[in-house]
Image (cartoon, rainbow, N blue to C red):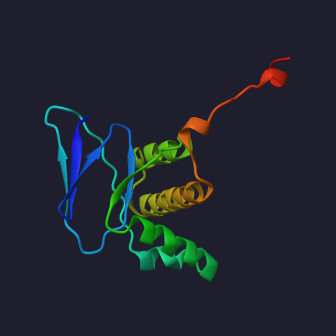
Amino acid sequence: MEAFCHCENNRHHVKEESGNICYLEHARVYLERQSGIRNHTLELRMSPQSLYTYFPESQDQKVIEEVLQYHRGKIEPCPISPAVQKCVYEIAGCSYKGTAKKIYLQGKILELVSMFLQEHISGYNPENVGIHLNDYDII
């Protein structure tokens, strides 16, 4: 997959099976994709004010503000953990209708936000996932 995201006069390469995070205020964003190739895109938008309503504690809001300021005005790759990937597939494959769908998707989006914040705080690294055996484990 070859895709580019144009935002505020910057062109960002979007890699296959990648996640990206950005915080943009009043900016036009364009996604350019290669023709003839099937693409799946999931875009979630939430204002900081909406996000803060779910985190009423001032300490939580401080962490969120730090994360938003860190990502302000730029599009950066974001590692996709297996848990995040599963949640994205559940959002994309939701078959509910009406109010049930709205409630389900709101819950899944908050799940994604909380996973992202936790991974951002704890420093998730996809290379550290898996079983690592040392000599004592093998014996």
Q: Residue at x 59, y 80 (%)?
A: 56
Residue 79 in the image, given as x and y percentages of width and height: 47, 46
Say whether residue 35 is visible.
yes
Residue 11, horizontal then vertical, whole percent: 21, 53
| Residue placed most toward the observer, 59 or 109 | 59
Please say if 40 is above or below 46.
above
- In the rendered image, is residue 57 in sight? no
- Give left or right: position of 16 versus 87: left
State the residue at coordinates (57%, 54%): 119
Left/right placement of residue 75 relative to residue 128 reads left
The N terminus lies in which quarter of the figure?
Answer: top left
Q: Residue at x 31, y 69 (%)?
A: 24
Query: Hey, which residue is sitting farthest left in the picture?
Result: 35
Give the position of the C terminus as an image quadrant.
Answer: top right
Q: Is residue 89 above or below residue 113?
A: above
**Viewer-proximal residue among 48 and 38:** 48
- Indicate the position of residue 112 as horizontal and vertical percent values: 50, 56
Residue 91: % across, % down: 43, 50
How many numbered circles are shown? 0
Q: Is residue 71 toward the left or the right of residue 9 in the image?
A: right
Q: Is residue 83 above or below residue 51?
A: above
Q: Residue furthest top?
A: 139
9 on left or right of 51: left
